[in-house]
Amino acid sequence: MLSPAFFRNRIKKTAALVALFFTLATMIPSGTAEALSLSDEKQVGRQVLEIIRRKMPLVEDGDILTYIRNVGNRIAQQVGPTTYQYQFFLVDQPVPNAFAIPGGYIFIYRGLIEMMSNEGELASIFSHELAHIQARHIHRSLDEAKILTVAAVAGMIGAIFLGGGAGPAVAAGSMGLSQSAALAYSRAHEMEADQLGFRYLCAAGYDPKDMALIMHKMDQLKWTGSSSVPSYLSTHPNLGERVLYLDDMATGKKPSPKKQQNTVGDFPLLQAALIADHGDQAKAFERFRSGMEKGEKPAIFGMGRFLARQGNLTEALRLLQEAARQIQSPFVLSSLGDIYYRLGRIQEAKKTFESALFLDPSASIVHYRLAVVLHETGQNSEAIDHLMSIEELSPMFPEVDYQLGILLGQTNRIGMAHYYLGRYYEQKLNWSLAIMHYKKAKANILDSPAKIEEITAALKQLESNKKESPFKSKK
């Protein structure tokens, strides 16, 4: 006999499905034969991003996100003038996958990064996904197919949503690609994304062979998985065929003289950080122990991060100090400075962060961490300067906005303090607090019509989100 709890859970799931269905229905322009406009596409992206943030585990470590963002932005800079503001996110799941959603949002899984050999392979995936967005393939699929109906969306979302997991996010992001759950790009779209992405990759200074190499690895893997999230092979078909022409494209193509030297050598550190912070603990320990015995420098760094994860800060500090002596890298110094800070050794943390910025003035997470230290030592003006230099990082790392809000409030810049706190709570999906802070910002900012206009638009969007979201606002 089925228990009352079973029926209560089924009712809750059904109610959530109905709410999600009506939310997603608002994303679709009226009429089944009309494709998404650019503004509609961006609106879809924002709403799908909300679902992803609520339903999928995302990596939030500042060192890792800084690296991911720097590689992604390096590729995005090769596009030229664009209507998109690209954002790059890392999904904390050990599967080889990546996907893009409307509006300029690109997601890569840590499992895919862990199977790569170098930064160029990571840049290749970003190049390909960015090309899908830049070419507006979802928009073009809608325009060509003219089959998207509310019923089709309800069936697809319902099947995946009731299955649990992270499916709704991907289904919503890919719903324009198919009337069914196949969610695959067309052969023509894949070829165009390969060609555009290859051009971006080469222009950014990466080895032309890297795109074929990572595609070949995924083709050899033949991974299908059991997750409700469609695999890279199912959404990006014909990999074997594409590897051949990517190889041909790379043959005779010399790498650009515009080599990127500042982070290419840090890729093994990125992999070590991911394994240390998010991998299976027993396997991570054994991997780093074995690597240290072989004299592998990234293994020293990885073991330091791993021990910090375990709470053994004293031994983590010793290993990260050793890694810093052997590897000149802002990635290592940022991690070392963070341990100094957590141990209360503020001045040593400050000097370490300053050394990291000397190596790479664009290291966003180091600016953030140094700002926190400067705030603790009473240097609020300098702290604000560091935070303002990286405020564009906030979609991936909302704490930048939070710290700006606190510091600006303490320096009596009330309007802008509420503005940044509004942005923080917007990123945290707490519509009520975001609206409250934006309203206070609007009342206190008197000298910037452009900022008032921005806040007015944000309030309008947030009021809409609050009414349409199938989820309760986060506390």
Image (spheres, grey):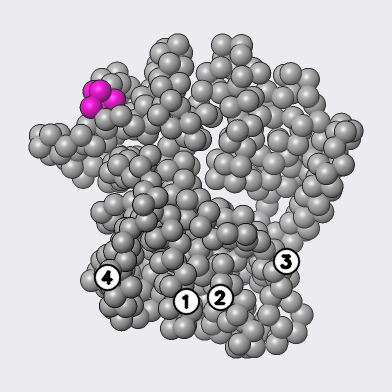
Which comes sooner in the sequence, label 3 or label 4? 3
Q: Which amino acid does label 2 sit on?
A: His
Q: Does the magenta stretch include residue 323?
A: yes
Q: Is residue 102 magenta?
A: no
Q: Residue 251 carries which label?
A: 4
Q: Residue at left 70%, top 59%?
A: 469
Q: Distance between the residues labelled 2 and 1?
A: 10 Å
Q: Residue 39 carries which label?
A: 3
Tell us which disc is closer to us: 3 or 4.
Answer: 4
Q: Residue 192 carries which label?
A: 1
| Foreground of the two, 176 or 379 | 379
Tally the numbered discs.
4
**Magenta extent:** 322-326
Which comes sooner in the sequence, label 2 or label 3? 3
Q: Is the magenta stretch mostly helix, strand or loop?
A: helix
Tell us which disc is closer to us: 2 or 4.
Answer: 4
| Foreground of the two, 112 or 381 | 381
Q: Residue 87 carries which label?
A: none
Query: Where the C terminus falls, by quadrant?
Result: top right
Q: Distance between the residues labelled 1 and 3?
A: 23 Å
Relative horizontal placement of residue 457, taking residue 304 as reference (left or right): right
